Image: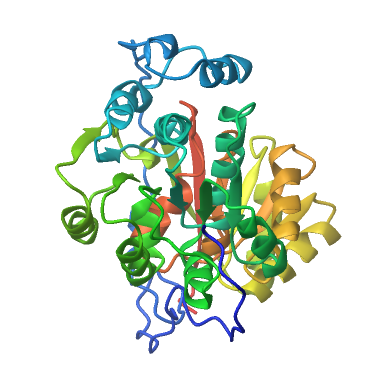
Amino acid sequence: MTYQPRRSFGRRTTGAPSAFKPRHSFKPGQRKGPGKQYIEASRFVKAAKEVTQVKYEATNSFNDFAISDSIKRNIVAKGYKTPSKIQDIAIPHGLAGRDVVGIANTGTGKTTAFAIPVIEKLLQNNKSAALIIAPTRELADQIDAEVKSLSRGTNIRTCLIIGGTPMSPQFRQLKANPRVIIGTPGRIKDHVQQGTLRLGVFDTIVLDEVDRMVDMGFINDIRFLLNEVAEKRQSLFFSATMDPKIEALVHSFLKDPITVSVKTAETSDNVEQNVVRHGDINDKFNKLHDVLKTDAVAKTLIFDDTKRSVEKLSRDLIAKGFKAEALHGGKSQNQRKRALDKFRKNDVNILVATDVAARGIDIIDITHVINYSTPQTYDDYIHRIGRAGRAGRTGNALTFINEHGR
């Protein structure tokens, strides 16, 4: 049983820590802002490198994997032809019950690489249950959709536990004892602390995009959750990087893991990077307007600092005749999902977003990323501009810099 009687609950206190720190003294090339790392303007300028896409020759076909016929039928229905590199190498180890650390760029097929072994294990052992943790609501939602499509026709039920949505439907779903829980760290922890979810029955644990969860301040929540799951378990950790904090998690919670690294060059290598120097706020908006009017700018993700500034900028762009949507943490999950769907389907071609809200975006045809405000850190900058130039395309990134140092 995963569900326990509902208890009263208070205001949530978990989540990423406040980003507020005392202001730095101003240095040229960086817009002032609370807690922002100084980034020399020259670091925002870099020519795109030609990235040669070498077609991977898979060792296995999906039919070669020791998986149930129902999964194979669903793979065919989804139109998957041959495994990607991370799938080809990681899936056999996952099916063998090994703990796996997968290091791979975003957009390489990691979700399927862990979903197939997870589903197969659940089909072979009706007492098994899986917990899949992702850094953002959007990514958790994408994982839920993939697991559902690969397990179609089986009796495996999933439950999506994310913030920004009412708790009551989640309580009802948990009562049905779903075999797979997919969610974000803070909301999962909420349920555990309220007694509505017991993690001791979960013997398969997946952490997806571990580096992002660490960046977002979820390291303590992750440690809390991992201490609650079954002692005898299989763990699958996927990340784009392997820094000391992630290594510490691996050594603490995984047993004799196999590491599968298929990471290629930084995603920003095939992104043309430059700056736009502006004067006052009116000049800044006018220059953004001019950039967006050029023919080359087809689908654009614009970053700004706060919920309020994102809302205002999107409204100002709409007033100028652009098709734009806003994405930030102040919106409900349904509003965020609608905004992303419109952007994905090209109903709008401009999405204005905050960093946290945009972390789950994986849309391959974004042509431009515009840093209307400078990022908190250079790592955040790399995350931002990596949204352009997907699937072998050359992307573009522009960072707005105040020429007067104000």
Residue 65, horizontal then vertical, whole percent: 37, 16
Residue at horizontal 35 percent and vertical 84 percent from the top: 24
Q: Is residue 261 above or below residue 65?
A: below
Colour mapping used in the image: rainbow
**289 left or right of 199 in image:** right
Report how many numbered discs are placed on residues in the image: 0
Looking at the picture, tell me which residue is in the foreground, 328 or 400.
328
Residue visible at 71% across and 68% down in the picture: 168
Do we see residue 349 in this rendering?
no
Task: Tell me: 32 left or right of 140.
Answer: left
Q: Residue at x 69, y 65 (%)?
A: 165
**206 versus 41 height, above or below:** above
In terms of depth relative to the viewer, which is nearer, 378 or 175? 175
Task: Give residue 89's quadrant in the image.
Answer: top left
Q: Residue furthest bottom?
A: 22
244 vs 159, nearest the viewer? 159
The residue closer to the viewer here, 190 or 105, is 190
- Provide residue 340's location: percent of width, then percent of height: 69, 49
The residue shown at (44%, 84%) is 20
Position of residue 395 relative to residue 57, above or below, is: below
Instruction: Estimate the x, y position of residue 182 in percent, counting from the top left.
Output: 52, 51
Res. 134 visible in picture: yes
Expressed as whole percent of the image width and height from the top left, the position of residue 177 reads 58, 52
Q: Is residue 386 left or right of residue 372?
A: left
61 above or below 242?
above
